[in-house]
Image (cartoon, rainbow, N blue to C red):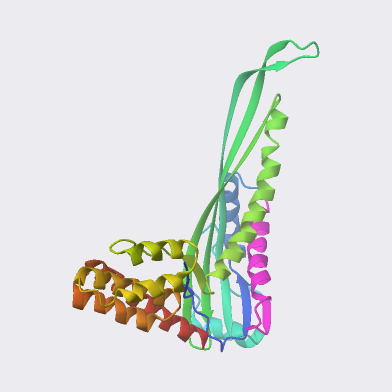
Amino acid sequence: MSVTEPAPVYIPSTIKNIGLLNRSLASDKNKPLDNIDQIFSIEGKNLDIIGANYTLQGIMDVLEKDEQYSTIKMVSSDKIENPGMGIFPSALTWGTVNNLCTENNIDAIVSLSFYDTDANISYKTRTVEQLNAFGIKIPMIEHEATINTNIKAGFRIYDNVNKIIRDEIVTDRWITSIGKGINPSKAIEAIIGRKEALLQESTKIGQDYVNRTYPFKIRVTRQYYVKGTENFEIGKRRAQTGDWDGAAELWEQELNNPKGKIAGRACYNMAIINEINGNLESAITWASKSYTDYEDKNALRYLKILRNRQTTNIKLQEQAQ
């Protein structure tokens, strides 16, 4: 079944206006070193700059669709020192954050603290057979270029209202581009494909980052008893067809079974149906009864899962406020 998990990063509803800050661009005094880094990394002259912009646009695309926020705007980083070179800079002081927020009339800042790409190229040739104009197979040299690109990006979220850094994380992605052909120029076409793939992935990095601020659903698996009496056997078949309430009617009939093992299993399964129906309190009560009254060890393990879910739901309710 599907359950909802709280957002890894919580942004309270009091935050209405957000600024996006690009700290990935090297400050003037750091640019010479950053240029050297680009040369050694086999980077295009402006590829990191363009990729960072695509990441920020990915962030903006998601935030602009959220009705919680009134304003999403870019914030200038001209007055902030940025090291560049793929270095995760130290956090901004709250004085700096407050000045930026005051100047731009915003409540919080999502900062792309750094963005950096590194690439390595491998080149190889091999002999292949191809048909010529007369249908005769002839040996030819095939050229293949492979470019593996590592994209790293660091993010911070500054909540100026509550003076809290809500998040601080580094992401790490790889993309691979391959080009092949009977001459080197065809193989090098991989470079063209690399740029497009990098920009697409950069956009997705931004979108995925913002999604950390939202609750998300996961699939979980639960085990339940299907043997012991005929009611359990029939209940299994009803459950397999999606008739969980029908299965629960049969499990309920076994709650007073004179055999403690059977009654314990029935209590356990009643916990299952209550969790499915969203009633965690009742599910916990039934799982507790299965363990305390009938010593069903599986119920104790399940009880821990239910209590964790209960704690998670409390956090979800807090985030919804």
Q: Is residue 99 left or right of residue 226?
A: right
Residue 61 location, x and y as percent? 68, 70
Residue found 53% across the figure and 53% down from its top: 173
Asked whether the viewer can see residue 90, the reply is: no
Does the segment drawn in magenta span residue 50? yes
Residue 319 location, x and y as percent? 49, 83
Q: Is residue 181 left or right of residue 113?
A: right
Q: Is residue 207 left or right of residue 1?
A: right
Nearest the viewer among 165 and 178 is: 178
Q: Is residue 133 left or right of residue 176?
A: right
Q: Looking at the picture, does residue 10 appear above or below residue 116?
A: below
Residue 25 found in image quarter: bottom right
Asked whether the viewer can see residue 122, the reply is: yes
Does the segment drawn in magenta span residue 177? no
Nearest the viewer among 51 and 89 is: 51
Residue 123 location, x and y as percent? 59, 30
Residue found 28% across the figure and 69% down from its top: 265
The magenta-colored residue range is 45-74
Q: Looking at the picture, does residue 87 appear above or below residue 120?
A: below
